[in-house]
Image (cartoon, rainbow, N blue to C red):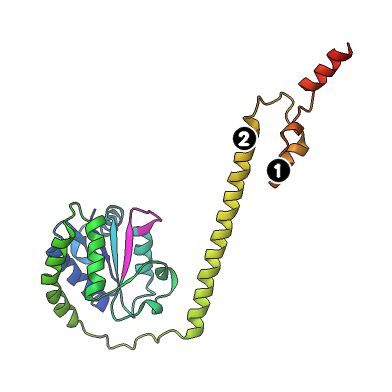
Amino acid sequence: MGVFICWSGTNSRSHRLAEILRDRIPDILQTAEPFVSDVDVGAGAPWMNQLTKALEEKRFGILCITPENQENPWIHFEAGALWKADEERRVCPLLYDIRPAEISGPLSQLQAKQFSKSGFLAVMKEVNRRGCSFSIEERVLERTFERVWPEIEAEVSKIKVPAVPLKKTRDSREMIEEILTIVRSLQRARQEEKESAKYEAIQAAIRRVLSSGAVPEGGYPPSSLSTLITGSPVNLDSLKPIYGRDSSDETDKNTKS
């Protein structure tokens, strides 16, 4: 359990925000156990080993995203290591001085929250559900949050804007192209889902036919099996052995005798 707080850029706004959150989250949720790499890895400890262990153990990730670091490779690495396509984990970009529409790349696939009173409260509620070894009642959380939030807000307001120029806002064409890319990927995923459903339906049809009687030693005529593969209606009377006679042929023979 616990919360892994991601940041990038020593002494950056992202770094300072992460430090504040590490100090203040336990004032709201005492069992959250936040982790920030430069604080929680002891001097002389194998840094990468400790970081990997924390990424494995923590169930909730908070990404401190600012205009300066949204494309930083380290943020993307930690986000991927935390998520791992595991439905039990949650990774939330916490946006400071940046709008959701300005987020690009893989991070745009995650449900982000603005660093605001309502946005941070929503994050804390999710941490309470998924990142704490012991959850508290939501009304208690809200009451505690109301008391602590003004202090957090005051500390964060003191974070200085970097002297280096910020990356310019993306233009509309770039955003539209990204939207088209996402839509197309969703369409491909939906088509693959349909193909998978069709395959399962064919398998079910085959199972129904085979369960209608014992499988003949010689097998079924290829023409009958092909109708199953194409999804066409199946005539059970046509499923006769390739070798030998069926019961009706045997009856005719006895009659003639």
Q: Is residue 192 magenta?
A: no
* Mark 2 / mark 1, whichever is N-terminal: 2
* Quadrant of residue 147 within the rendered picture: bottom left
Crowding around mark 1 (Cα neighbors within 10 Å: few <14, some 14 to 19, many 20+) is: few
- Label placed on residue 123: none
Residue hosting label 2 = 208
Q: Position of residue 235 (x, y in %)?
A: 73, 37
Residue that carries the numbered disc 1 in the rendered image = 233
Q: Position of residue 198 (x, y in %)?
A: 61, 49
Give the image location of residue 5, x and y in percent. Answer: 26, 65
- Stretch in magenta: 83-93
Instruction: Decide: few, some or many residues near mark 2? Use Cα within 10 Å; few <14, some 14-19, many ≥20.
Output: few
User: Mark 1 falls on what kind of element?
Assistant: loop
Q: CA distance from mark 2 to mark 1?
A: 12 Å
Extreme residue toward the right, this view: 256
Q: Name the quadrant containing residue 118.
A: bottom left
Could you tell me the amino acid type at mark 1? Pro
Q: Residue at x 27, y 85 (%)?
A: 162
Q: Residue furthest top?
A: 257
* Left or right: 159 in relation to 111: left
Residue 110 visible in the snapshot: yes
Helix, strand or loop under label 2: helix
Left or right for 184, reference 6: right
